[in-house]
Amino acid sequence: MSTAVEPGTRLAERFRLEDRVSESEGATLWKAIDEILARPVAVHTFAPDFPRVQEVVTAARAASRLTDPRLTQVFDAAEDDGRSYVVSEWVTGESLVDLLAAGPLEPERAAGLVAEAAEALAHAHEADLHHLCLRPSHLIWTSGNTVKVLGLAVDAALAGLTTDNPALDDAEGLGRLLYAGLTGHWLGDEEEGGLPAAPMTDGHFCTPRQVTAGVPGYLDTITVRAALPESRRGQQPLASPAEMAEALGDVARPLPIPMSYTPAPAVTAASHSEGLTTKERPSSHPPQPIHHHHHRPQSRPSMLNRALMTIVVLLVIAAVGVGAWTIGRSLGTPGVTEAESTPSQSASAAVAPEVVKPASADGFDPLGDDRAEHPEMAGLAIDGKPDTFWHTTNYNSSELGRLKEGVGLLVDMGKSTKIADVVATLSQAPGASVELKVGDAPDLAALKTVAKAKNVAGKITLTPEQAASGQYVLIWFTRLPADEGKFRGTIYDVVVHSPGSA
């Protein structure tokens, strides 16, 4: 640049440079303030001898036309009078490196993060824009609980990267991010961003399942197809972000991580990695959890405790006396049976609801083209585990994209069963409308609606208005809650109560 750029410099009469974040090979990243909109922004400036200014500005202008919120927004890019710059979104949150500080992520969460990134890059590729240098620092879980991919097109221009097959390169980059999330290692010969290099066996990189126990087979396969060609064994590669997005299309999208500790101040991860990776941040130690100490009461009883103990003793004595009187009365009154002496207890025992274990479950989509709705996940809703679940396909509207009247989870009880109620645990997102249908055939026409619930979330109880029995129990979504920009129904658990067998 023809003039020095220092803190306090104003560009385009609105962007005031404040803090120099990083610098590499003549490109400097700043935290700045947009004085018109009163918000922080990231600004790249360039030294006079930086050789790729035109390429960077051109890439930034092309990226600014994209509207996917999962990609960093570019607000301005200029090349004039020797003072060129690029202004983009300032994002706060945790990079994949930060998320992996305590070890590998839960497999479904890692897959959900990468699935969001894959969809965003698939949209970018439709506009002929590519990333080409995906690293853990480019994948951010923002402070607003969304996924953000940093540096599209701009980072490659800054580094002077080109390729003959950008779709394949970005698919491999997504596979490497998934590998990192599943294992805590970087799929390469050297460490990246503080992540150790992936382990090897017999001269080949280990697959995720060889590194981390509990990685589902389908995620291991997706990673291999995207980024481990030597382990594919005849499987077709995933050769583009669109194919990667399709392969991960059914995974649950990431939700906020429950905080068991006092969170550290937000990290400006987005601005750090927007194209400049030579100066890495020092690795941070994971925050220490807060240990909640449960204080035991003192051994010496208080006056209140002694009073309570006295009351309890008196009640026990009174209960013993009443029991003895009742027994004596029963013995002294011939002809009175035990059933006659406790009619209310016998009646309540006869109708007490009991949990009936289903035989199986299935995704139920009789009105869809393929007549299936994730049947491979249906059993997860009846396994009794609160952290596993079945979900519908993602739809474009709460009315199931106006494609059908409903979709649901069909539970087979194994035999005709009286239904007292069904307790279903849904996602916490509000807006679901469900119906409980019961019948003796797995056919929509044979299943009768016995209960309804509107605008519900979390654990709900569906109780038939009249006596209902049947072999099949259907939880039927007629309206779906929002889920990461789309709509889908989720069921974590189903418990069927019966007053007795039919």
Image (cartoon, rainbow, N blue to C red):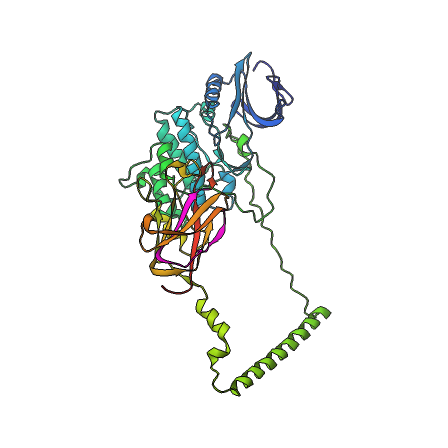
Up-down relation of residue 186 to residue 130 (above or below): below
Residue 67 belongs to magenta span: no
Residue 86 percent across, percent down from the top left: 53, 21
Residue 264 percent across, percent down from the top left: 60, 42
Residue 460 belongs to magenta span: yes
Give the farthest residue toward the top. 81
Lateral position of residue 451 relative to residue 87, left or right: left
Magenta segment's dominant SS is strand
Can residue 371 be seen by looking at this rendering? yes
Lateral position of residue 315 relative to residue 81, left or right: right
Q: Start and end of the magenta stretch?
A: 456-480
Can residue 190 be seen by looking at this rendering? no
Quadrant, the C terminus: bottom left
Residue at the location (43% across, 30% down)? 133
Residue at the location (65% across, 61% down)? 295
Up-down relation of residue 499 to residue 117 (above or below): below
Lateral position of residue 431 relative to residue 229, left or right: right
